[in-house]
């Protein structure tokens, strides 16, 4: 077991609702760590519609998904939350009253008095390519995320996909991999134009390979990949030598391990009471799209409201001996000091 990370609150999901919850918790002197399966903060706003305009954030007539994420990150800076990205919380175990031990798929262990589930519609799960027998290589030779770049040092890496993730990791791993091959079904890419230009420059310079087509089979024994069979757009069949494959076929939403945490579920959502949005397990809260209650509306602004009320109840668990005095940021000098307001 790795060293235990101790914090007041563990927030599962770094979308807008989770980020704002860190602000409300911070005002009440509670420290928060985040775990999110994505490799960046912002949840659906950053992953699915970073440039899409949002029109119903109070006081902001129009803001993009990424713009809202950036603003929330700026707002929580005074409280210095810690982010653990590219990881998924697998287990949540109650070990005290209140005290929880939470473990991620990367082996990190947290102990906290409060757990806040802010996972939107669930966790983003990578889509598995339709390649026969790929399961045998997953976790050893086939990876759906880059946890540690050093894992790919001196490897023959096959990256499959044409979006930002595929191009970003092509460029980031190129300096340390033995050889990078990028495979996409067509010679058009959905990634940022600058990234595509950089990739094409490397190909032109003979520093990496670009192939067009689709993987139809994998070869290698005992989970150790040795090559991939590729069917080209002209129906030709060729072999690509590789010992590692990174497929980026997009993401899908699944409830994931939440179903195994001992909390009540209702139609793949988490029922909560509406005074603090607490689940049936004391100390575990659910805010945002993942919760359900009478009259629930799935709006970001509603999630902000839920995070504010959740924080008031969370304070009782983190500081059971301390009386909570409600204050306004507009008039409280102590809150303004926390925010660094002159």
Image (tube, helix red, strand yellow):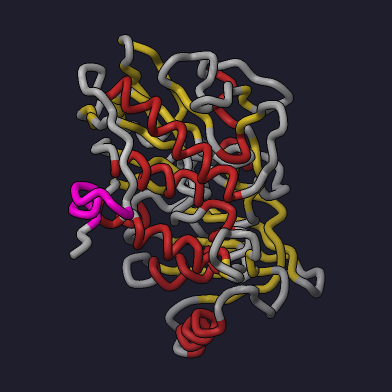
| Residue 237 seen in render | yes
Looking at the magenta stretch, what is its main secondary structure?
helix
* Quadrant in the picture for residue 73: bottom left
Residue at the image position 50 percent from the left and 51 percent from the top: 16
Viewer-closest of 38 and 263 = 263
The reply to whether residue 225 is visible in this rendering is no
- Residue at far right of view: 235
Percent coordinates x, y for residue 311 in the rendering: 39, 33
Which image quarter is the C terminus in?
bottom left
How many circles with numbers are drawn on the protein? 0
Which quadrant holds residue 105? top left
Does residue 101 sit above or below 80 in this rendering?
above
Give coordinates of residue 47: x percent, y percent. 57, 58
Q: Is residue 272 magenta?
A: no
Residue beneath the point at 44% across and 39% down: 308
Q: Nearer the viewer, residue 227 or 330?
A: 330
Residue at the spot 35% in from the left edge and 62% down from the top edge: 74
Magenta stretch contains residue 335: yes
Q: Is residue 184 left or right of residue 82?
A: right
The single residue placed furthest to the front in the displayed view is 331
Comparing 314 with 186, the one in front is 314
Task: Please state which of residues 56 and 240 is positioned toward the viewer in this rendering.
Answer: 56
User: What is the quadrant of the N terminus in the image?
Assistant: top left
Q: Quadrant of residue 326?
A: top left
Q: Position of residue 83 (x, y in %)?
A: 34, 47
Stretch in magenta: 330-339
Q: Residue at x 63, y 22 (%)?
A: 271
Query: In the picture provided, is 342 more to the left or to the right than 127?
Result: left
Is 259 placed above or below 248 here? above
């Amino acid at each position: 077991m790795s060293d235990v990370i101790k914090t007041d609150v563990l927030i599962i999901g770094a979308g807008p609702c989770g980020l704002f919850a860190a602000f409300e918790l911070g005002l009440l002197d509670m420290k928060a760590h985040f775990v999110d399966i994505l490799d960046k903060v912002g949840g659906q706003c950053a992953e699915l519609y970073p440039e899409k305009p949002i029109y119903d954030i109070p006081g902001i007539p129009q803001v993009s998904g990424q713009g809202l994420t950036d603003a929330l990150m700026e707002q929580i800076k005074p409280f210095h939350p810690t982010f653990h990205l590219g990881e998924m919380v697998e287990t949540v175990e109650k070990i005290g009253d209140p005290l929880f031990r939470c473990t991620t798929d990367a082996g990190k262990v947290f102990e906290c008095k409060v757990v806040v589930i802010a996972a939107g519609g669930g966790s983003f799960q990578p889509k598995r390519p339709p390649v026969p027998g790929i399961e045998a290589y997953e976790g050893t030779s086939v990876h759906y995320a880059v946890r540690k770049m050093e894992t790919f040092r001196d490897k023959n890496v096959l990256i499959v996909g044409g979006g930002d993730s595929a191009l970003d990791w092509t460029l980031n791993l190129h300096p340390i991999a033995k050889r990078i091959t990028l495979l996409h079904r067509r010679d058009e890419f959905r990634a940022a134009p600058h990234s595509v230009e950089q990739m094409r420059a490397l190909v032109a310079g003979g520093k990496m390979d670009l192939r067009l087509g689709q993987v139809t089979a994998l070869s290698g024994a005992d989970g150790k990949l040795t090559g991939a069979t590729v069917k080209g757009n002209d129906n030709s069949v060729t072999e690509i030598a590789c010992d590692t494959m990174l497929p980026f076929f997009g993401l899908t939403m699944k409830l994931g391990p939440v179903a195994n945490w001992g909390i009540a579920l209702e139609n793949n959502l988490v029922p909560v009471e509406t005074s603090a949005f607490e689940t049936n397990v004391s100390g575990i809260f659910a805010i945002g799209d993942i919760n359900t209650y009478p009259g629930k509306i799935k709006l970001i602004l509603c999630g902000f409201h839920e995070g504010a009320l959740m924080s008031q109840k969370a304070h009782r668990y983190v500081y059971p001996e301390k009386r909570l005095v409600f204050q306004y940021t507009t008039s409280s000098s102590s809150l303004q000091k926390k925010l660094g307001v002159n």
